[in-house]
Amino acid sequence: MGKRAIRRAVDRNRLKRAIRESFRNAQHRLPSMDIVIQATQGKDDKNNSTEVEHALAQLWKGLEGDA
């Protein structure tokens, strides 16, 4: 998560914590693979934590079937 995508350090750290917690809860269902999540510029309208959690849940669900 770079400064270009998410300007404020507080917001970057909050997003990182949300991603880590979501992954920790879903990792037992996921296959062994490396996962990279990259924030892109212009996507900082997802400040709502429920929207972020929902997007991550969909991501984990999509990865469950892949191996």
Image (tube, helix red, strand yellow):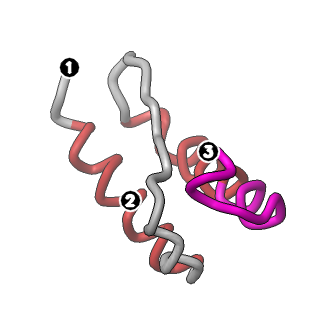
Q: Nearer the viewer, residue 59 or 7?
A: 7
Residue 38 percent location from the top left of the image: 47, 43
Using the image, determine if residue 33 lies above or below residue 60.
Answer: above
Quarter occupied by residue 20: top right
Q: Secondary structure at mark 3?
A: loop
Q: Nearer the viewer, residue 40 or 35?
A: 40
- How far apart in space, not on screen, are marks 3 and 1 (Cα)? 26 Å
State the residue at coordinates (38%, 36%).
Answer: 29
Q: Position of residue 26 (x, y in %)?
A: 47, 44
Residue 34 image offset from top left, x and y in percent: 43, 19
Residue at the spot of label 1: 67
Query: In this rendering, is residue 42 above or below 51?
Result: above
Q: Amino acid at mark 1?
A: Ala
Name the residue that disc number 2 marks: 57
Q: Which mark is residue 1?
A: 3
Q: Amino acid at mark 3?
A: Met
Q: Earlier in the sequence, mark 3 or mark 1?
A: 3
Q: Earlier in the sequence, mark 2 or mark 3?
A: 3
Labels 3 and 1 touching (C-beta < 8 A):
no
Q: Tell me where the magenta segment starts and ends, as one range.
A: 1-15
